[in-house]
Amino acid sequence: MINQSNSISKTASLLKSLGHPIRLRIIIALSRNTSMTVTDIIYDLSIDQPIISLHLSILRKNNVIKVKKEGKKSFYSIHDKSVKQIVNIAYHSR
Amino acid sequence: MINQSNSISKTASLLKSLGHPIRLRIIIALSRNTSMTVTDIIYDLSIDQPIISLHLSILRKNNVIKVKKEGKKSFYSIHDKSVKQIVNIAYHSR
DNA sequence: AATGTATATTTAAATTTAATTATATTGGAT
DNA sequence: ATCCAATATAATTAAATTTAAATATACATT
């Protein structure tokens, strides 16, 4: 597939990263909390650590969330407002 | 997986359906045109008919687009404003 | 009724993604 | 230095998606 616009790929990748139940739940949890550690998220969603870490890495790669490391803890938060807007519209449109 | 909220699943499914390059291009094309036949879309994207039809069916299933059949033609259009909003925000956020 | 056009569905193969389990890294406390 | 807690990464397998090709349906025209 030659010459597929880069913006399209990036936008698709972003939306795809949001389109997974666990990742969506992570985003919704982060929307309520301004910042959470991985342990917080694991506890909040009751999902195993490696699965959470995997999905966090996918969201990180797509600039949906950002991390701040302090000691051995990683504090995650929503990257920017547009993510919240997208999820909000999607969530309330159905 | 017990007791996973239905709204979350639906929202994830919606966003996932938007998160594919071909489907995104279909939506962008429909955003410019108010209504297009399958043939129009095939021509516009230069992608084979069965592939386009498949992705149209996925978008239909998620209420992203709607169809109006007239004779042997199917006229497709964006289902509602929220779809455009989501794609717009996603597209311009990167 | 046979043909052509527009679109949809099915099937099989290839590719991607996800979940699971195991292992690794890093930093602080003892 | 050793141990534990917090997090990340890797490897394996399982499951879901995507593509491609073939086939089917439905309508209009001849």
Image (spheres, coloured by chain):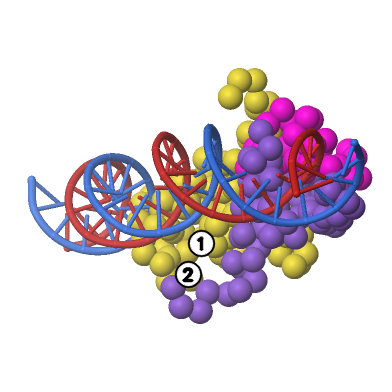
Chain colours: A yellow, B purple, C red, D blue
Which residue corresponds to the image point at 87% horizontal and 55% vertical from the top-left?
Answer: B68
Q: Considering the numbered disc 1 on the image, is that residue within a helix, a strand or a loop?
A: helix
Q: CA distance from mark 1 to mark 2?
A: 8 Å
What subunit carries mark 2? A
Task: Name which residue type carries label 1.
Answer: Ile
Location of the C terminus of chain A by quadrant is bottom right
Give above or below for B26 relative to B83.
above
Is residue B92 visible in the rendered image? The answer is no
Q: Position of residue A21 (x, y in %)?
A: 54, 62
Residue B20: image location, x then y, percent = 63, 42
For image coordinates 66% across by 63% down, the residue present is: B11
Q: Does residue B54 appear anywhere in the picture? A: yes
Q: Give how far across and how far down residue A87 sits, in percent.
A: 69, 58
| Residue B39 painted magenta | yes
Q: Is residue D13 left or right of residue B69?
A: left
**Which residue reaches farthest bottom?**
B3
Left or right? Give the position of A58 relative to C30: right
Instruction: Please rate how many residues cluster around mark 1, counting C-alpha atoms within 10 Å: few if below 14, some from 14 to 19, many from 20.
Output: many
Q: Where is the N terminus of chain A found, in terms of image quarters?
A: top right
The dominant secondary structure in magenta is: helix
- The mark found on residue A45 in the picture is 2
Q: Are marks 1 and 2 in contact (CB under 8 Å)?
A: yes
- Earlier along the polypeptide chain: callout 1 or callout 2? 1
Residue under numbered circle 1: A22
Amino acid type, mark 2: Leu
Which portion, as a residue range, is magenta?
Answer: B20-47
Closest to the observer, B8 or B77: B77
Residue A66 vertical position relative to residue B6 in the rendered view, above or below: above
